[in-house]
Image (spheres, coloured by chain):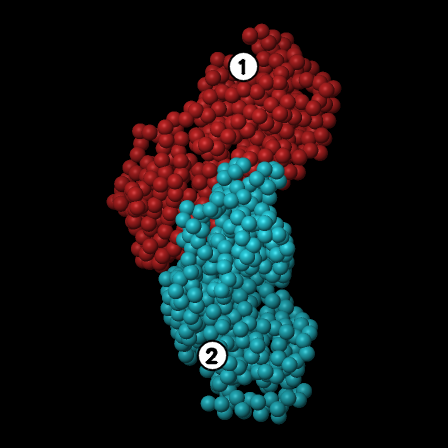
Chain colours: A cyan, B red
C-alpha cells in the first residue's frame, strides 16, 4: 500500500516552499500541551520500575530475554497502542559463568572483575601468568609479540568524564579489540581497566568484537580501584602474577524479538515516526539506565500522544529492540527488513543514554525540512534543548544499521556526565534514575514525535539523504 | 618499676593548682610546630597505601592477619620507634566461603549480599523459604513466633546519614541481634538491609553478637538497592520466595597480636600516652578507611614527634590492635593485661572512623586536668576542632574494654557524613581517602599526644575517674 507514500512525496514536492515548512498553529499548540503534560508526568518511571522489578537483568538470549519480550508485548498493549507485534532477530549468544581474577604474587588479593562479553573461557582451573602493563590499544598494537607472549596483558587506559560521553569511544577500543590483537601476539589473556568513570568498585562489562574467524583471548575488566591497585603493585618493581579463571561460553544462535507498538496515523498511516529504545540489558545490574530508562521515556512519549483527543497524521511507532548490547542484532534485523521501504520512515530517534536531561539536538533531514526542524527546536527550547549546527544524526545505536539506507534521524543529546558511573555495572539500578529528568526526556520525545508526525514536509529518508554534504 | 608512677601522682598532688595547669610556653610552641608540620605532610597516607597495597584485606585470623602483623612490626621499626613489640590476643575466628541470595518467586533475580560475621552456614545447597518483612529488631522481638517460623525474616530498617554517624547505632541492632532473636522464634534465616548509607550496590558486612550458648541463624545483608527491590517485590502482593546459600564457618581459636611501638619518654618514661588504631579489617575492600586510615594517622602523629629535636616527657605509644572488627578481641586482651596498671596511662585516643576531618573533641579526665584540656583545645581550634561540653570519652572502640578500669581518654570526632558509604563494603579502598583530610587528623593527634605527654598534671586514669559525675 504505497499510496500514502506517493502522496507524501507529492505533498513534499508541491509544498516544499517556505510557507509549507510552517506547522499548522493548532499542531504547535498541541505540541505545547504535550510538553506541559509530559513534564508534569513521571516520564515513564513506572515502566522502568515495572521492567526492572518484574524482569530485572535481561541479557539477550538468556531466559530473562523471553520474559522481557513477553513483558514488553503486554506493556505496550496495556498502554493502548493500536497494534503491537514482534519481529524476529537471531544472534549468537554468550553466557557468563563465573570470573575470578586474583593477584597471587607478590601479594595475594582478589580483584572485582567481570568477563567481557563474548570472552571465551580460560582452561578449567584458570591460568596463571605474569602481567604486562600497556597504556592503550595502540601500545598493544605496537608491542613486539615476545613482550606479551604467554603473559596477561593489562591495558590501563582510563575513560575521561564528559557531558557528552565522548570519553567512552577512545577508551573502549581496549575492550572491543584488545583480546583479538593480543591473541595474534600470543598473549595468554587480557585484563582492562573498566571503561567507566566511577571510582566505586564495580567492574564494567560490555562486548568485544564478535568475529568467528578470529581467535579471541579470555578477557575481563577490573574496577577502577582495582586497576589503581594493580598499577601500584606493578610499581613495586617485582613481577606481578595473576590467576584468572573465567567460565563463559558462546551458545547456539537464539531468536529473540523486536517488540513494536504502533499508533496508527490518521492521514498518512503508512509513514512512520520511529521512536526506539532497547529492551535487552547486560546481565549485571537491572538495566535501569541502560536501557530501561529509554523504554520508559519513549513509551511515555507515545502514551502522552495517545491521551490526546486527536490522532497524529503519520503513524508513530515505539520499537523496543532486541540484543543491542551484544551487537545491535535487533537493529540489524530491523534495518534488513526495511531495506526496500526506508522511505516510509519520516524519522528515527532512539533513547539510549540513561535518564539524564536532554540539552541539545541534531537532525539528519533533507534540506527542505530544515525549517521544520528549526520550528520543532523552538518548541524544545523551553526544555533547555538547543539545536546544534550538526547536520548528521543516526537516531541512536539501534538505527545505525539503517544509516546506510539513508534513514532520516534526530539525535537528542542527554547529559551523560554520570552515565558511565553506572552503565554496564552491577550498580545500574532503579534508584539511579530521577523521574523529573525522565519527564523532561519524555516531553522532548513527545514533541519530537508529534511534530514529526504533523510535519508539512517529508524528512527525506532514502538514498538521497546519503548524498548530502557532510558537516 | 613503679617509681615514675608514684612520682607522677606526687607531682599531680603537689602541682594540681591553677598555675600548674599551664603548659610550659616552649611546649606550646612545639605543639604549634607539630601542627604546622603535620598539616604540611601527607597524614600517613603512605602508610595506608603500603598496608592496603601489600597486605590488602586482613580479616582477623585469616592468613592475611599474620602478614599484617609482620607488616606492622616492620613498619613501626622503620618509622623509628624506640621499641616495637607484639602482645597476643586470642579469639574465635570466622571465615566466609560464599553467599548467594536470590529471589526465585515471583521473579528470578540475584541479590548482592554478604554474610554477616559469625553467621553459620546454611545446609549444603541452601535453603528456600518465603520472606516475612519486618520494620526493625523491635518488630522482630514483638512478632508472634508462628509468623516467622520456617521463614526468612527480612529486617528492612535503613540507616540515616549523619555527620557523627549516629544513624549507625539504632540500625545496627538488626545485624547484631536479628539472627539470635529470629532463631528463638523458629525462623529459617535472616536478611537485613545493609547498615550503610550508600545507594551503590554494595552489601555491608559486619559482625553479629558472638554467643556460643545461643543458637544463631544464617544471616546476610543485601545492598540498599537490593533491599529497595525486595520491598518492591513484597509490594506486588504475591509470596516472595528466596533461595539463600551461605558457606561460612567458625574456626578454632587463633592468636594474633596487638603491635605496639613506643617513643620512650625523657622524664616520665613509665607514663604512657596511648594512640590507637586497629590493624585488622573485614575481608571485603582493602580496609583503607576502616582502619588503614587510623593506622596511618596515628603513625604519622608519632613520626612528627619523633622528628623533633626534643623527646616527650612521657612515653608515647602507637597501639595497632588485633581483631577489632570481630569483637574488640585485641582491645580486650590489652585491657586485661593492664588491669593492675591502668594508672600508668595518661590518656588513650584511637583513630577509627575513616579519614574525615576532625571537628570536635571530648575528654574524660580528672577535674583538675580540665584546664590542661582547655589549653590543648586552644591549640586544636586552628584545625577547626571545638571542645565539647561532653565529659565522657572512651578513646575509641579498642579502649572500651579498658573503660571500666577508669582509663582517661580523649575522643576526637571525625566528620563521618560519607564514612558509612564505604565502611565494611568491597568499596572501602584507598581512593576514598583524601590525604589532606588525613593530614588534619595527624596534626590533631600529634598535638594531642605531645601536649598529653608534656602535661603538668596527670589526667587521672584509675578507679577514681569512674566516680565522677556523669554528664
Tell me if residue B401 comes above or below residue B164 in the rendering: above
Marks 1 and 2, how far apart in space? 87 Å
Which residue is at 36% across, 51% downward? B102
Which residue is at 58% across, 92% downward? A10
Both marks 1 and 2 on one chain? no
Local secondary structure at mark 1? helix
> In the image, residue B317 lies at what x, y percent?
58, 21
Q: Which one is closest to the eye, mark 1 or mark 2?
A: 2
> From this viewpoint, which residue is outermost toward the front?
A146
Q: Between B334 and B394, which is closer to the camera in this rendering?
A: B334
| Chain letter behind tag 2 | A
Q: Kindly identify which numbered label has been placed on residue B208.
A: none
Q: Residues within 10 Å of mark 2 (few under 14, many from 20)?
A: few
Local secondary structure at mark 2? helix
Residue linked to disc 1: B343
Q: Between A178 and B360, which is closer to the camera in this rendering?
A: A178
> In the image, residue A350 lies at what x, y percent?
53, 70
> In the image, residue A19 lies at what x, y percent?
66, 88
Which residue is at 46% across, 38% downward? B283
Q: Image quadrant for the C terminus of chain A?
A: bottom right
Instruction: Give residue A88's quadrant in the image.
Output: bottom left
Which residue is at 58% across, 79% downward? A406
Q: Residues within 10 Å of mark 1 (few under 14, many from 20)?
A: many
Residue A129 shows in the view: yes
| Chain letter behind tag 1 | B
CB atoms at circles 1 and 2 under 8 Å apart? no
Residue B400 shows in the view: no
Residue linked to disc 2: A337
Q: Between B3 and B52, which is closer to the camera in this rendering?
A: B52
Q: Between B296 and A333, which is closer to the camera in this rendering?
A: A333
Amino acid at each position: 500500500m504505497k499510496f500514502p507514500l506517493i502522496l507524501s512525496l507529492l505533498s513534499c514536492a508541491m509544498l516544499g516552499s517556505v510557507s509549507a515548512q510552517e506547522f499548522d498553529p493548532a499542531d504547535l499548540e498541541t505540541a505545547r500541551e504535550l510538553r506541559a503534560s509530559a513534564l508534569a508526568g513521571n516520564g515513564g518511571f513506572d515502566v522502568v520500575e515495572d521492567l526492572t522489578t518484574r524482569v530485572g537483568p535481561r541479557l539477550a538470549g538468556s531466559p530473562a530475554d523471553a520474559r522481557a519480550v513477553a513483558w514488553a508485548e503486554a506493556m505496550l498493549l496495556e498502554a493502548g497502542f493500536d497494534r503491537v507485534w514482534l519481529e524476529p532477530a537471531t544472534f549468537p549468544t554468550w553466557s557468563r559463568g563465573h570470573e575470578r581474577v586474583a593477584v597471587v604474587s607478590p601479594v595475594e588479593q582478589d580483584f572485582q572483575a567481570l568477563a567481557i562479553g563474548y570472552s571465551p573461557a580460560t582452561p578449567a582451573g584458570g591460568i596463571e601468568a605474569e602481567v604486562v602493563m600497556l597504556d592503550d590499544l595502540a601500545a598493544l598494537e605496537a608491542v613486539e609479540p615476545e613482550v606479551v607472549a604467554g603473559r596477561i596483558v593489562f591495558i590501563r587506559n582510563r575513560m575521561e568524564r564528559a557531558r557528552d560521553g565522548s570519553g567512552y569511544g577512545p577508551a573502549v577500543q581496549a575492550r572491543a579489540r584488545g583480546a583479538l590483537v593480543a591473541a595474534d601476539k600470543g598473549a595468554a589473556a587480557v585484563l582492562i581497566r573498566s571503561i567507566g568513570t566511577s571510582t566505586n568498585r564495580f567492574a564494567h562489562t560490555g562486548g568485544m568484537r564478535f568475529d568467528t574467524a578470529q581467535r579471541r583471548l579470555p578477557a575481563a575488566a577490573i574496577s577502577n580501584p582495582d586497576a589503581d591497585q594493580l598499577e601500584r603493585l606493578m610499581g613495586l618493581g617485582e613481577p606481578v602474577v595473576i590467576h584468572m579463571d573465567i567460565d563463559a561460553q558462546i551458545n547456539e544462535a537464539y531468536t529473540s524479538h523486536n517488540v513494536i507498538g504502533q499508533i496508527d496515523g490518521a492521514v498518512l498511516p503508512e509513514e512512520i515516526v520511529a521512536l526506539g529504545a532497547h529492551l535487552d540489558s547486560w546481565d549485571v545490574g537491572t538495566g535501569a539506565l541502560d536501557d530501561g530508562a529509554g523504554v520508559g521515556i519513549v513509551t511515555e512519549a507515545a502514551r502522552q500522544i495517545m491521551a490526546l483527543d486527536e490522532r497524529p497524521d503519520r503513524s508513530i511507532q515505539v520499537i523496543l529492540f532486541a540484543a543491542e548490547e551484544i551487537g545491535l542484532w535487533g537493529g540489524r534485523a530491523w534495518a534488513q527488513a526495511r531495506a526496500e521501504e526506508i522511505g516510509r520512515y519520516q524519522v528515527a530517534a532512539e533513547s539510549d543514554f540513561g535518564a539524564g536531561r536532554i540539552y541539545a539536538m541534531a537532525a539528519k533531514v533533507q534540506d527542505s525540512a530544515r525549517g521544520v526542524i528549526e520550528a520543532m527546536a523552538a518548541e524544545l527550547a523551553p526544555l533547555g534543548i538547543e539545536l546544534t549546527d550538526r547536520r548528521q544524526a543516526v537516531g541512536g545505536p539501534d538505527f545505525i544499521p539503517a544509516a546506510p539506507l539513508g534513514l532520516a534521524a534526530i539525535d537528542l543529546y542527554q547529559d551523560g556526565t554520570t552515565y558511565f558511573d553506572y552503565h554496564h555495572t552491577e550498580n545500574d539500578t532503579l534508584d539511579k534514575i530521577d523521574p523529573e529528568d525522565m519527564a523532561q526526556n519524555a516531553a522532548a520525545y513527545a514533541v519530537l514525535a508529534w511534530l514529526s508526525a504533523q510535519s508539512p514536509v517529508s524528512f527525506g529518508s532514502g538514498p538521497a539523504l546519503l548524498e548530502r554534504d557532510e558537516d
